[in-house]
Amino acid sequence: MVQFEVPAIVPADPQANVTDLLVERVKKTPNLALFAVPDGAGWRDITAAEFHKQVIALAKGFTAGGIEPGDKVGFIARTTYEWTLVDMALFFAGAVMVPIYETSSPAQIAWNLTDSGAVACIVESADHSARLDEIRDEVPLIRSVWAMHTGDLEKLVAQGKDVTDEEIERRRSIANGADIATLIYTSGSTGRPKGCVLTHSNFVELVRNSSKSLEEVLTVPDASTLLFITTAHIFARFISILDIHAGVKTGHQPDTKQLLPALGSFKPTFLLAVPRVFEKVYNSAEQKAEAGGKGKIFRAAAATAIEHSKLLEEGKKVPFGTKIKFALFDKLVYSKLREAMGGRVVYAISGSAPLGPRLGHFFHSLGVVILEGYGLTETTAPATVNLAKKSKIGTVGPALPGVGVRLGDDGEVEVRGINVFKEYWRNPEATAAAFDGDWFKTGDIGTFDDEGFLKITGRKKEIIVTAGGKNVAPAALEDPIRANPIVGQVVVVGDQKPFIAALVTLDSEMLPTWLANNELPGDMSLADAAKNPAVRAEVQRAIDIANKNVSRAESIRKFTILPTEWTEASGHLTPKMSIKRNVIMDDFAGDVEEIYAVPVNTTNVSLS
């Protein structure tokens, strides 16, 4: 059994809780800008001391509003400054937040609130209020609902003005490291969401140790980041708390369509993103260049960037000709992309899905080092992450300090350490099934190199076994196909079938630009595009590229383009944009059967 374990580099403090991280930050640097909020065309800074003051005032409001230490409080909101303010205020009031994705359906909201036993709920918008109203009769334990859009947070602050500082100090100090800090529900990609009990020590110890490992990222002059992925997810929530501890200025942009303007004005030094964001940046730049008649130049620049990065990573000498081309493209292409991201981004932390070496090398040559990491809700986000001082593109890095990672006999990744959750809420059977002793079984399959850098190769439950007995990991095929600009999502199929095939959806945002660049009507419907020969040829090209990475027995030999999209609203994607494979296989069973209705003897035949 292969195992790598890294000892903690910060002594554990079993009495510490999350509130101590803010208290310590205020003592160290009260006047440091810890947050920035939109203000006209720019941003207004909020110091550590001012944030602390606002947190205490809101915590007093929750106290006056009837929240008791240990109470569960649901929270539905987008990624804004107020999200983190509410989060920390609930910690100071001694409460336990139950974050709910702002895109959750009424049924999902009802499940999270009833299963957790929440006694109150905070909503951001009228839309959230309407969804909560739909299931109000199903959540009888909810005695208070506060709506941000009607000014309820301000009313709570006013209501709490008579609560003493001593009472908030008492409440914030009740929890120790072993106590529950938050109850986060899994995204439900393989069934009903389970509540993960994350403790104060999970956050405190992981934050303190990770800040040492990521020191180069967090301590650059005027370090800052712009959060745009949902703070209801553990990935962004962890970074929010890490930033408070490390003194990194955080901004928020809930509307990803406004991301580029926000990056331009905020000018962060590092980003937190999922691979789909990097794919969108690359694909948008490529299609914009194509529309301006410079597509050939962009593709040559991309090829040079990837070649340059690979040579540097392998420690090889960069040929003079490549150096000249790189310098030219740096002026023509790379510098413009750096400027589009604000001009100061040096690092980007990527997680939640595999990034792929192509994008890693491309951004590396732009001067943006993407530190790919790996973790789950159950591991308080990161278990492994590439380091600024040593990273390997195509891996998710080594174990963080205080964390152990091993591979089971079947290659399953197992984790133990300071970051591993306590249990599934009110679900001892699921908890018992998830552990082998103190090792949490992630359900992911991986491999190590000789230095302990982990590579994730697929999900254990998603491994396809063909009728011929060939084991196929779908991710190895799906990820490169999804990188194509017109592909929205892809699901590889073929379990107990004679060959591997794929269901493909188109990207409705990128499709019109691509169509126009290829002299086709930009307003073509998804249904018409799915049948269009040029579109089908482009999808086939993406599949051919993916097939180069696998054996013939593992290659995709048929595909069908669906005339629809898979979205979170349609029930086919999780809030972090992962595919719900089991739901898709049920809903599109007829399309899968149609693929296999006619035998195939040749390679790579599209289904017309």
Image (cartoon, rainbow, N blue to C red):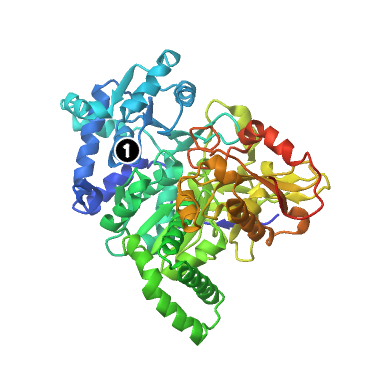
What is the tally of numbered marks visible in this picture?
1
Q: Which of the two residues, 555 or 453, is positioned nearer the viewer here?
A: 555
Residue type at mark 1 is Trp
Where does the image place residue 82, in percent across and percent down from the top left?
28, 38
Q: Is residue 251 above or below residue 109?
A: below
Where does the image place residue 424, in percent across and percent down from the top left?
55, 32
Q: Residues within 10 Å of mark 1 (few under 14, many from 20)?
A: many
Q: Is residue 333 above or below residue 554?
A: below
Q: Which of the two residues, 42 or 570, is positioned nearer the viewer here?
A: 570
Outermost residue toward the right in this view: 468
Quarter of the view holding residue 219: bottom left
Q: Secondary structure at mark 1?
A: helix
Q: Does 108 sit left or right of 503 as displayed? A: left
Q: Which residue is mark 1?
A: 83
Q: Is residue 362 above or below residue 95?
A: below
Q: Does 501 sit left or right of 369 as displayed? A: right
Where does the image place residue 320, in percent across and percent down from the top left?
49, 87
